[in-house]
Image (tube, grey):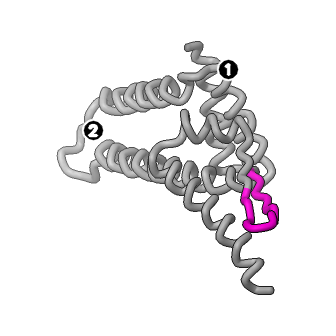
Amino acid sequence: MDEKILSKYHRVKVLSEQGEPGERTNAILIMQKMQQKHPNIQMEHAVWWHNKSKEENSHHENQPAPTQARGFDWVGMANRAQNVFGKMMDFAENAFGVHQAADLVQRCGISKRYNSKSVSFTISVPEEVYAALCLDFNPEQQRVFVNSLLFRVQDALEEDLKD
């Protein structure tokens, strides 16, 4: 895939994770459009970002060693910091994905219909949300989505119990 597209996807992804609330929402929509246009962009981005990080690491590793025999190992510290940062990014990406799954539940509709002998609940899931659930979500995101949807159904039932 073109590096220009992957670079744009990366900038939008970072904005969706770190931007202001309105920026995040717009960035998520742009990411979803890019994912629809380029179905493998998430995987290709991960590979691209991994390779880019390796290039930066190798650049730092190829720096000449300091002539001073003793002293602080700045290169080692930078590598350790980058490892920690990478793990934190992975954690943040997973947490963001779980949060996104819970947010998508709000786009689903739940309606009740009272029949003569029963009450029917209808759950409407928009097509793009269903596609994300089936194709893009990891198992943890799927679990969060389904549980959040079930909580909304439970809330609808509890409304009648309060009356």
Name the side, left or right, on which 100 lies relative to 84: right
User: Where's residue 152, x and y in %?
Assistant: 68, 65
How crowded pointer 1 is (Cα within 10 Å; few <14, some 14-19, many 20+) is rated as few
Q: Residue at x 56, y 61 (%)?
A: 147
Give the main secondary structure of the magenta stretch.
strand
Is 25 part of what is drawn in magenta? no
Rendered position, 15 above or below 58: below
Q: Residue at x 76, y 50 (%)?
A: 107
Q: Amino acid at mark 1?
A: Lys
In the image, 122 versus 31, the foreground residue is 122
Q: Amino acid at mark 2?
A: Pro
User: Where's residue 118, x and y in %?
Assistant: 73, 66
Rendered position, 33 above or below 82: above
User: Where's residue 38, x and y in %?
Assistant: 62, 20
Label 1 sits on a secondary structure element that is: helix
Tally of marks: 2
How crowded pointer 2 is (Cα within 10 Å; few <14, some 14-19, many 20+) is rated as few
Q: Of tags 1 and 2, which is closer to the observer?
A: 1
Q: Quadrant of the N terminus?
A: top right
* Distance CA(mark 1)–CA(mark 2): 48 Å
On residue 55, the disc is none
Furthest residue toward left: 69
On residue 66, the disc is 2
Rendered position, 2 above or below 150: above
- Quarter-wise, where is residue 34 in the image? top right
Q: Which residues are magenta?
A: 108-121
Name the side, left or right, on which 20 lies relative to 146: right
In the image, 28 versus 144, the foreground residue is 144
Question: First in sequence: mark 1 or mark 2?
Answer: 1
On residue 37, the disc is 1
